[in-house]
Amino acid sequence: MAKNQIILEKMISDFLMQLKNAPILILNTDFTIDQANEAFLSTTGKTAEEVEKSYCYQTIYGYEAHCFSAQPEFPCPVLETMRSKESAQAIHEFPTINNSSAFYNVVSYPIKNSAGEVVKVIEIWQDLTDEFLTRMNKRTKQLKDDINHVIHEDRMISLGKLSASCVHEINNPIQGLLTFSHLMEKTLAKQELSEDDIEDMRKYAPIMSAELERCGNIVSGLLSFAREAPGTKTNIELNDLINSVFLLTRHKMQLQNIESDIILQKHPLVIRGDKNQVQQCLLNIIFNAIEAMPEGGKLDIAIGQDETDRQCRVKITDTGCGISQENLGNIFDPFFSTKKENEGTGLGLSIAYGVIKSHGGDIQVTSKTGEGSTVTITFPMYLSDD
C-alpha cells in the first residue's frame, strides 16, 4: 500500500513537471532544487544545469541565506509544508529577467515516504501580475477620483464663503448707486437744469462709474475662482496670485475687523504648477487664519525668496487663538479639526499639504496658544533654464 502511494505521488510529480503554463519546482528538504519544468526555466532565464542541485533562494533571489531569513515579511510555503506536512500558500514578489517584478501565488504540496515523512516538496507558481496591476490601476484611479472629488467639494465650500462676503461687499456700492440714481432721476424731472444740477451730475457720473467698476472686479474675481479649468501645469506669477487671493478675501477680513497687510516683491517670482490648486491651497490657509480671529486681529501676507536654494516663500501670519502644541502635530491629518461640529470638514490643511507637496514645496506651521500662528510655504522657483 505504501509502495503504491509512493508510485502514485511520483506519477503526479512527473505529470506536473510536464505542464508548460505554470512554473513548477520539486525541492529537496534542504531547499535544493531537484527538478524544474520548462516554464520555470523560461521565467528565470536559466538552464536546467544551472538550476538543479542549487538552492532555491540562490536561484530565485540571489540570496546567500534562506529567503525567510532575508525576507521575513514573506512567509515561505516550502518551510511551512515541511513543518506541517500539509499544503501551504503565499504570495511572493519575484525579480524577472527584464529587471522588473512579478507577483506569484506560490502553493506547495508535500511528497511523503511510507512513514509519512516529507521527503520532497512540489512548488507551483501562479502568475498574478496582470491581476495585481489591473486592481492597482483601478484602485489608483478610484483614489484620484476620490481626491479630485474632495478638492472639488472643498473648492465649493470656499466659493460659498467668498460668495457670502462678496454679497456684503457688492451691497455697499449698489446702495450708493441707488442713491445717486434717485438723485439724478429727481434732477432730470425738472423742467430746466441749472448749472448746479449739471455740476452735480458731473460729480455723480465718475463716482457711479468707479462703483460699477468695483462691482465688476468683485464679480470677475469670484467667477475666475469658480470657473473649472483642466488640471494643467502652467507658469504662475506668485505676486499676481497672492494679490488675487488677497482681493478675494479682503472684504471678509474687513467684516471681522481684521487688519491686513500684504508685502509683494518688486520683481516677478514664477513657480510651475496648477494655478487653481495653488490658489485653493492659499485660500484654505487664509480662511483658517480668519476663522481663528472671530473678534478681529491682524493678518499679514509676505512673499520672499531665497536665491541660494532657488526657493520662493509665502508667509501668512495671524494674531488668532493659536494652536496648542498637543494639536500642532495633527493639523495636516485628514478630518482633524479643533472647530465645533458643522463648522468645518477638517480637510482644508490636509488638502493644502497635498497640493504643496505635489508641487515640490513644503509647509511649516509655528504657533503659540493665545498669540497666533505663522504658516510658511516654500515653492521651487521656476527659471527659464529649468
Image (cartoon, grey):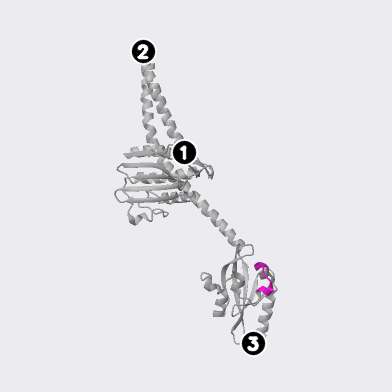
In the figure, is residue 42 to the left or right of 289?
right
Residue marked by disc 1: 268
Residue segment shown in magenta: 42-50
Magenta residues, dominant SS class: helix
Mark 3 or mark 2: whose residue is earlier in sequence: 3
Residue at 40% across / 46% down in the picture? Answer: 285
Residue marked by disc 2: 195
The image shows residue 163 at horizontal and vertical percentages of: 41, 39
The image shows residue 321 at horizontal and vertical percentages of: 31, 48
Mark 2 or mark 1: whose residue is earlier in sequence: 2
Q: How many marks?
A: 3
Check disc 2: other Cα within 10 Å, few if <14, some if 14-19, many if 20+.
few
Q: Amino acid at mark 3?
A: Ala
Residue at 36% across / 15% down in the picture? Answer: 197
Residue 118 found in image quarter: bottom right
Q: Nearest to the eye among marks 1 and 3: give it.
A: 1
Instruction: Provide the secondary structure element on which disc 1 rests.
Output: loop
Q: Amino acid at mark 1?
A: Pro
Check disc 3: other Cα within 10 Å, few if <14, some if 14-19, many if 20+.
few
The image shows residue 147 at horizontal and vertical percentages of: 49, 51
Residue 1 found in image quarter: bottom right
Residue at 32% across / 41% down in the picture? Answer: 298
Instruction: Provide the secondary structure element on which disc 2 rests.
Output: helix
